Amino acid sequence: MKAIVVCLFCVIILVKSDEFLNVTYEYLNVTYEPVQRQLLDFKKEHPHPIGLWTKLAGDPVELRDTITINSDQFNNQLFVDTFSTFDGRRIPERIATAKGTGAFGYFEVTHDVSKYTYADVFNGVGKKTPIVVRFATALQNLGGSELIREIKSMATKFYTKEGNFDLLTISTPVFPFRDPMLFRDLVNAFQRNPQTNLYDFTSVYDITTLRPELGHNLFWIMSDYGLPNGYRRMDTFAIHAFEISNKHGETHYVRFNLRSELGFSPLTSAQAAAIQARDLDYYTRDLYNAIDSGEYPAWKLEMDVMTSHDIQTVDYDPFDVTKLWKNGTFITVPIGRLVLNQNVENHFRDIEQAAFNPGHLVPGIPGPVDYLFRGRRMFYRDTQNYRLGRNHNNILVNMPLYEKTYVRDGRPPTRLNMKNAPNYYANSFNGPIPYVDENRPWKKLQILDNNAVDLEPMWYFYNYILEDETHRQRFIDNIVLSLLPVTPPVIQRVFQLLFLVDKELATRVKAAYEVALAAQQAAALAVPPPVPGRRVPSARDHPKKETK
């Protein structure tokens, strides 16, 4: 009993200590980052406890129940609440784009684009629409590094009056593949080896040489464009050619792009390695600090536009997501400005549970017509049903501004579950009714994709996208660094593929690879012998002293 009294006394002293010491929380003569100040900022905003602590059922927590030593744990409902929820609080990790961050903001229309689309979100200069954005690195686990040379993503959910519009963009203007069947195999090859549980460049180059259409995107990643200096300085691209229509039913085909107002800025591999040694969360920290400091990141939303006539006259496939549109075959039209001005208050609630689906479209934007998009709108829904449950659109961050549906029941959250309204359609009792969209085009373009491999985009990238010799050399250095762990015969197939793309490129990569490999082998021979191991001290290494 005496021990319990002492413990309670200590708790009371800790609660009262701030008043006793007359502590203030002004940051005088000290500079803290916003991420470091978060807890102190909360206390400054709430100078007194925010309320009474309750158990999950709402009954208040009694102080003696916060200590379970020498107590009846079975009858301590606080203990049961705590560990029954703690043990099961994780939801499945995303297969791709697991490591991410995000923020809230708004989208503002800055230009009249009514001649292209009647989508309400893009019409009315000055109109603002609330948004949530999730950034992520494509292939890292939740605890991985953001400073890896790979695709970065930026998913934006527009909370429009006509439903949620999800615009999913990535940091390269081309996608790795056209066939949705490749998604599983690409992710598996670029993620961890099933036996070693390590990332394996042999599998990366093995699938790339066997599926050469992957090479164009890999070239972008190995260049300066593959490692932006944080999410704020990253341009992103929606990849697909979207079909959009105006109020007269006229269609256009567009590629949406988001251009950072800070301008694109890359990191070299050496810079990224130095930052990674001390901070795996560099991108997340940079975004949070900027928003909290009032330096709101912003992007210009624009669209590259072709008419129905244009797509029939160009000498390439404008629906091929692995290729760029050629200069001179389209016009670029500005739409508006996307601004992030509010950090999330709870990452799990607002970002980890956020569900983005490219199939979430709005009137005036019927969406892409290619086969990759058809596959994506299926497996995004499937993964969200698995991770979050079939009612994931009822989670707060995913809820549209307006919803009336005949979808009922299932696992929570069900919200109001449509109360007592009729649960079937058609009905004569005033349940929700559909509308007629008189502006919707009567016909939708049907296209046939091809599976031919074209190496010309890789040749064009090396000779024209890489703007100068220093950039080409960094590109080659990055390729060589990734080739060092690759085993035969895959390494030979890499050189053969590069030779087919560009003879000069293949020659330079092979020469640099041989030099780097020789240096690596020499360094391995020069490694000094390991220091003999030591035992971690334990109690038996320190005999008990005699007490007088």
Image (cartoon, rainbow, N blue to C red):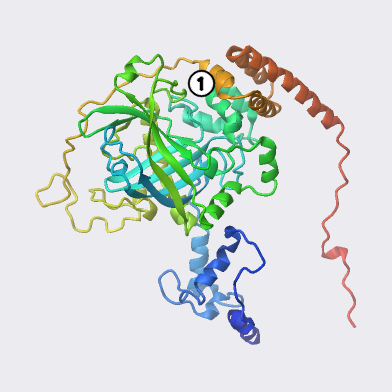
Q: Is residue 324 visible?
A: yes
Q: Percent x, y for residue 410?
A: 32, 52
Q: Residue type at mark 1? A: Glu
Residue under the image location 69 percent in, 18 percent down: 508
Q: Position of residue 33 (x, y in %)?
A: 61, 58
**Quarter of the image where one finds residue 59:** bottom left
Q: Please give left or right for residue 403 compared with residue 140 in the image.
A: left
Q: Is 319 rendered above or below residue 244? A: above
Q: Position of residue 355 (x, y in %)?
A: 41, 46
Q: Nearer the viewer, residue 229 or 132?
A: 229
Identity of the residue drawn at 57% across and 68% down: 40
Depicted 359 relative to depicted 295: above or below: above
Q: Name the side, left or right, on which 166 lies relative to 477.
A: left
Q: Residues within 10 Å of mark 1 (few under 14, many from 20)?
A: many
Q: Secondary structure at mark 1?
A: helix
Quarter where residue 247 is shown: top left
Find residue 370 and report its image quarter. Answer: top left
> Residue 45 placed where, x, y %?
50, 70
Q: Residue at x 28, y 23 (%)?
A: 445
* Closer to us: 221 or 107: 107
Q: Does residue 356 appear in this view?
A: no
On the image, numbered disc 1 is attached to which residue?
A: 213
Counting the numbered discs, the total is 1
Quadrant (top left/top right/bottom left/bottom right) for the N terminus: bottom right
**In-image side of 11 versus 58 (left or right):** right
> Quadrant location of the C terminus?
bottom right
As displayed, is residue 463 above or below residue 429? above
